[in-house]
Amino acid sequence: GDSVTQMEGPVTLSEEAFLTINCTYTATGYPSLFWYVQYPGEGLQLLLKATKADDKGSNKGFEATYRKETTSFHLEKGSVQVSDSAVYFCALPNRDDKIIFGKGTRLHILP
Amino acid sequence: GAGVSQTPSNKVTEKGKYVELRCDPISGHTALYWYRQSLGQGPEFLIYFQGTGAADDSGLPNDRFFAVRPEGSVSTLKIQRTERGDSAMYLCASSLGGRAGTDTQYFGPGTRLTVL
């Protein structure tokens, strides 16, 4: 079945460092791809999405490009801030129209 | 505007007891979802409502779990004869439509259930 694999955390970086969180997927067809974020004490929220191959989703300085050739959707940010500390989930809708989430990657940004 | 709300935020119960978890979706959202998130894992689908009816309950783990949405708004997830393995964060989400690929799901803060 469809699945998502993302890098294990926690990931600890200093403020202003470059961030990459890897995500690869297995899916039937070419589904939309999502990154969700869960800030401490808050609900999951959609960070960005891409709906087709080569699309780039972006929001709050984060970017991810839908790579069909490598079945990847890596999350990147050029200069992280302490406020980016959260858990990040890569996800996709499967053929039954249910969202399949990765296990999440906890990100700690040190001031 | 108001987002998705869930009550209680925390629930501690004893093994064998019955619990109810409540979700209040965003007004006007016809689709409502329940997920379960265990520690260190991503959310896992439990059940999806479109309006008042359960359109897909294939994620419910067994018949101890049941959910209702009688008026097409508030939903209640009910767990009978709770077991320690039911301990998890229970998340609710709502969306305007029921297409997971195109209709953004908005999540509540969750209810953390602990079964002693």
Image (cartoon, coloured by chain):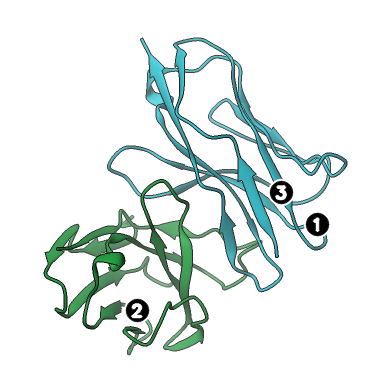
**In the figure, what tint was chain A given?**
cyan
Q: Position of residue A60 (x, y in %)?
A: 53, 29
Q: Identify the residue under disc 1.
A: A30
Residue bearing mark 2: B73
The amino acid on which the numbered mark 3 sits, given as a three-letter code, is Tyr
- Chain letter behind tag 1: A
Left or right side of B4 for B60: right
Where residue A74 appears, as percent x and y from the top left, is: 67, 34
Name the front one of labels 2 and 1: 1
Name the spot of residue A108 as percent of width and height, x first: 40, 23
Mark 1 packing: few (<14 Cα in 10 Å), some, or many (20+)? some
Going 49% across and 42% down the picture, which residue do you hit?
A: A104
Which three-letter amino acid code belongs to the residue tagged 2?
Ser
Residue A21: image quadrant is top right
Q: CA distance from mark 1 to mark 3?
A: 10 Å
In-front residue for pair A55/A14: A14
C-alpha distance separating marks 2 and 1 = 32 Å
Residue to which mark 3 is pinned: A25
Contact between marks 2 and 1 (CB within 8 A): the answer is no
**Residue B30 shows in the view:** no
Identify the residue at image location x=51%, y=47%.
Answer: A103
| Mark-to-mark CA distance, 2 and 3 | 34 Å
Secondary element at tag 3: strand
Instruction: Write down the chain letter for disc 2.
Output: B
Neighbor class of circle 3 (other Cα within 10 Å; few <14, some 14-19, many 20+) is: some
